[in-house]
Image (cartoon, grey):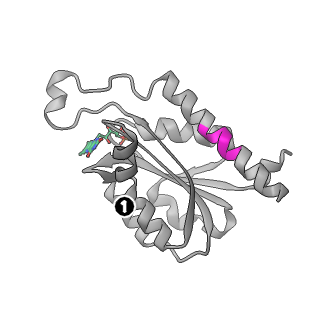
Amino acid sequence: MNKQDLKKTLIICYSYHHNNTLKITNVIADTMNAKVITLEEINNVDLTEYDLIGFGSGIDSGKHYKPLLSLAKNLSQVSHKPSFIFSTSATQGKRKVDKDHSTLRSILTTKGYTIIAEFSCKGFNTNSFLKHFGGMNKGKPDVNDLKDAKAFANDLKAYLALQETL
Ligand SMILES: Cc1cc2nc3c(=O)[nH]c(=O)nc-3n(C[C@H](O)[C@H](O)[C@H](O)COP(=O)(O)O)c2cc1C
C-alpha cells in the first residue's frame, strides 16, 4: 500500500445543474481512492474516520450551493482537520473564484477545518435566459479540466505523503 493510501479521504458533493461538479468529484475520488457521498448520506458516515474531507458543488449567486453551506454550518466542531474545497461555475478568474469560495471557506474555518487546497473550473450553464441560447461553456468540464482535476488530486496525494514523513 502506498503511504498516501493510509489517509482516508471523503468527498461531500452536491451537483445538480448538469452534474458538472460530480464529474470533477469522480476524477478526484478515483485518483485519491476517496469515498464520495451526497448531502443526504451525511448521517450514514462517521466523519471522524476520515483524515481529509473534500467539499464541492456548483456556484449559485457567488457562493457554493446553499444545501452544502447548510451542511457545513451543521458540522461538529473539529480541531485543525485537513479539508479541501472545489467548485464548477459559469465564469472563472482567480479573484472571482477566491470570492466564490469565501463563504464555504469561512464556515469551515470557523468549524475548525484547515483548508489545504482549492480547485475550480468552468461548468456548462443553462441558468435563466441562457437555456434559450444553447447555454454557455458547452462541453465543460472538458478533458483538459478533468486532467487539471487529476493533477490537483495528485498534488494533494503528494502533500499527504509528505505529511506522513514529517
Ligand atoms: C440557479 C443558478 C445560479 C448560478 N449562479 C452562478 C453564479 O453566481 N456564478 C457563476 O459563476 N455561475 C453560476 N451558475 C452556474 C453554475 O455554477 C455552473 O453551471 C455549475 O457548473 C453547475 O454545477 P453542477 O452541474 O455541479 O450543479 C449558476 C447556475 C444556476 C443553475
Which image quadrant shows ligand 1?
top left
Q: Is residue 33 visible?
A: no
Mark 1 CB lies closer than 8 A to ligand 1: no
Residue lying farthest front?
95
Question: For the residue carrying disc 1, how many other residues have a C-alpha within 10 Å: few (<14), some (14-19), or many (20+)?
Answer: some
- Residue 153 picture quarter: top right
* Residue 155 included in the magenta stretch of the image: yes
45 or 93, which is in the foreground?
93
Residue sitting at x 55%, y 67%: 113
- Residue that label 1 marks: 103
- Residue 116 visible to the viewer: yes
| Residue positioned 62% across, 34% down in the render | 151
User: What segment is highlighted magenta in the picture?
Assistant: 152-157
SS assignment for the magenta stretch, majority: helix
Tell me if residue 135 is in the magenta stretch: no
Judge left or right: residue 128 versus residue 22. left
Q: Give the x, y percent position of residue 44.
A: 56, 64
Q: What is the quadrant of residue 139 in the picture? A: top left
Residue 104 sits in quarter: bottom left
Image quarter where the N terminus lies is: top right
Q: Secondary structure at mark 1?
A: helix
